[in-house]
Image (cartoon, rainbow, N blue to C red):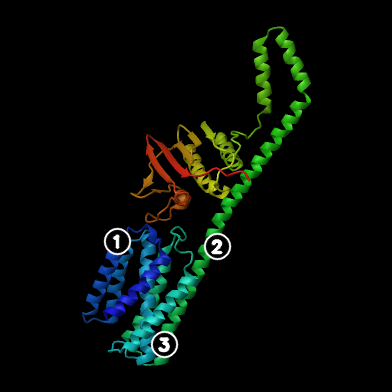
């Protein structure tokens, strides 16, 4: 029996790898947890009890096992219920196929072989087609609604067992039907999750295109003003020369200053030479200048950095959006942005004022936006989590702090300068 439970534990491990990010689990902790779970299941199996009671007990132990992974509690409960449910359906189907209606009887080795085979096939099908995107923790907000599907399916199976259904074919059909039903529903949910993720990526691309379009307009206006200045340069030089002959230095300075102001294009707040940064930051600063009273920006970076425009949009787009929204609701209306590059390291610092209290756990800040919060148990701050994902991609680090109603994000990325072809 312990060999069978160990084999089932392998199936459970594969399910966990589909549902959760196993990289974030401390080394050694997962092995200890799985050994304890196996010992608990084997101990319970030695105690005579009805199958529904054993199912509930095993589900509780599995729910405790899931706690080693990072994710919402609703998602963890869903994973425990679904895994136990699918394994139960496979076991009941094997019993009906081999032993007619003797669900609580004594079985031979062939039953365990068939059960494990069914479990393995179901897990592979679900891994391949049904839960490819659900690993994303922010994919679904209402995990609790999905929990009802495996629970109701288990209740139906328990009813068949309790009332001793004697028809082999009906029992097999119901068990197989529950397996297919769960697979189909989770396939549909996974497709919805995939669509949701594509929409999020499309939103990033749309903002990127908007920033490029904005920067193109800025460049075109600058070019138009330069052509106008070049056309009138002869008159400007004559005027400056005339003022110089009369030693009117203050008037010369004022005249040159007016020429500079005329050259500055509306909407061009920075000009670092890096097209990705300039286009996005100019777009965000244009919005910030309209909504905030205290906006400061300093950017000093090479023209070509080995970081994609898509990643720039996720980092600066999310952080600047959050900063502007928070600063707008504060009294100081402060926003500061610093980006500089030194010896292979890219530093990004964003500071903004905020009002009220921030929501945070030990691991992360939570969103205070009404449209992000559906209940007190939801885990939010999706934008920050997306930023962390990009930071990890470049082997960087991110620090977040809040003090005296100033929210500050500091990011370090290890980025190289693109070599000229």
**Residue position marked by numbered label 3 in the rendering:** 172
Residue beneath the point at 58% across and 42% down: 304
Q: Nearer the viewer, mark 1 or mark 2?
A: 1
**Residue position marked by numbered label 1 in the rendering:** 28
Image quadrant in which the N terminus is located: bottom left
Label 2 CA crowd tier, 10 Å (few <14, some 14–19, many 20+): some
Label 1 CA crowd tier, 10 Å (few <14, some 14–19, many 20+): few
Tag shown at residue 260: none
Circles 3, 2 touching at the beta carbon (< 8 Å): no
Q: Nearer the viewer, mark 3 or mark 1?
A: 1
Residue 67 shown left or right of residue 127 in the figure: left
User: Foreground: 307 or 52?
Assistant: 307
Q: Secondary structure at mark 1?
A: loop
Is residue 305 visible in this depiction of the protein?
Answer: yes
- Between the residue at mark 3 and the residue at mark 2, the CA separation in whole angstroms equals 35 Å
Residue beneath the point at 56% across and 34% down: 289
- Between the residue at mark 1 and the residue at mark 2, the CA separation in whole angstroms equals 36 Å
Residue 369, position in %: x, y? 46, 48
Task: Report how many numbered discs are placed on residues in the image.
Answer: 3
Tag shown at residue 195: 2
């Amino acid at each position: 029996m312990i060999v069978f439970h160990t084999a089932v534990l392998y199936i459970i491990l594969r399910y966990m790898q589909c549902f959760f990010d196993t990289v974030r689990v401390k080394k050694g902790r997962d092995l200890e947890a799985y050994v304890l779970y196996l010992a608990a299941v084997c101990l319970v199996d030695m105690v005579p009890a009805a199958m529904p009671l054993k199912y509930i007990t095993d589900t509780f132990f599995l729910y405790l096992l899931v706690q080693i992974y990072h994710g919402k509690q609703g998602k963890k409960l869903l994973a425990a219920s679904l895994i136990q449910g699918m394994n139960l359906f496979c076991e009941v189907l094997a019993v009906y196929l081999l032993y007619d209606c003797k669900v609580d009887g004594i079985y031979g080795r062939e039953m365990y072989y068939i059960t494990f085979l069914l479990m393995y096939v179901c897990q592979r099908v679900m891994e391949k087609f049904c839960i490819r995107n659900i690993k994303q923790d922010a994919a679904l907000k209402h995990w609790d609604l999905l929990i009802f599907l495996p629970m109701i399916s288990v209740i139906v199976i328990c009813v068949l067992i309790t009332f001793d259904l004697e028809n082999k074919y009906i029992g097999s059909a119901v068990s197989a039907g529950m397996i297919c039903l769960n697979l189909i529903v989770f396939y549909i949910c996974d497709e919805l999750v995939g669509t949701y993720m594509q929409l999020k990526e499309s939103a990033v691309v749309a903002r990127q295109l908007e920033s490029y379009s904005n920067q193109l307009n800025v460049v075109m206006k600058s070019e138009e003003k330069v052509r106008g200045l070049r056309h009138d340069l002869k008159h400007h030089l004559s005027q400056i020369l005339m003022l110089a002959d009369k030693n009117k230095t203050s008037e010369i300075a004022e005249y040159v200053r007016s020429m500079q102001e005329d050259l500055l294009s509306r909407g061009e707040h920075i000009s670092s030479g890096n097209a990705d940064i300039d286009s996005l930051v100019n777009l965000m600063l244009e919005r910030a200048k309209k909504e905030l009273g205290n906006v400061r920006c300093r950017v000093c970076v090479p023209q070509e950095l080995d970081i994609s425009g898509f990643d720039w949009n996720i980092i600066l787009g999310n952080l600047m959006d959050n900063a502007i929204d928070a600063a707008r609701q504060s009294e100081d209306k402060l926003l500061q942005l610093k980006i500089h590059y030194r010896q292979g390291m890219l530093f990004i610092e964003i500071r903004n004022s905020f009002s009220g209290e921030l929501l945070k756990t030990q691991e992360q800040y939570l969103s205070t936006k009404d449209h992000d919060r559906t209940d007190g148990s939801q885990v939010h701050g999706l934008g920050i989590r997306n930023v962390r994902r990009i930071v990890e991609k470049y082997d960087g680090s991110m620090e977040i702090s809040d003090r005296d109603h100033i929210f500050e994000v500091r990011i370090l990325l290890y980025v190289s300068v693109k070599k000229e072809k």
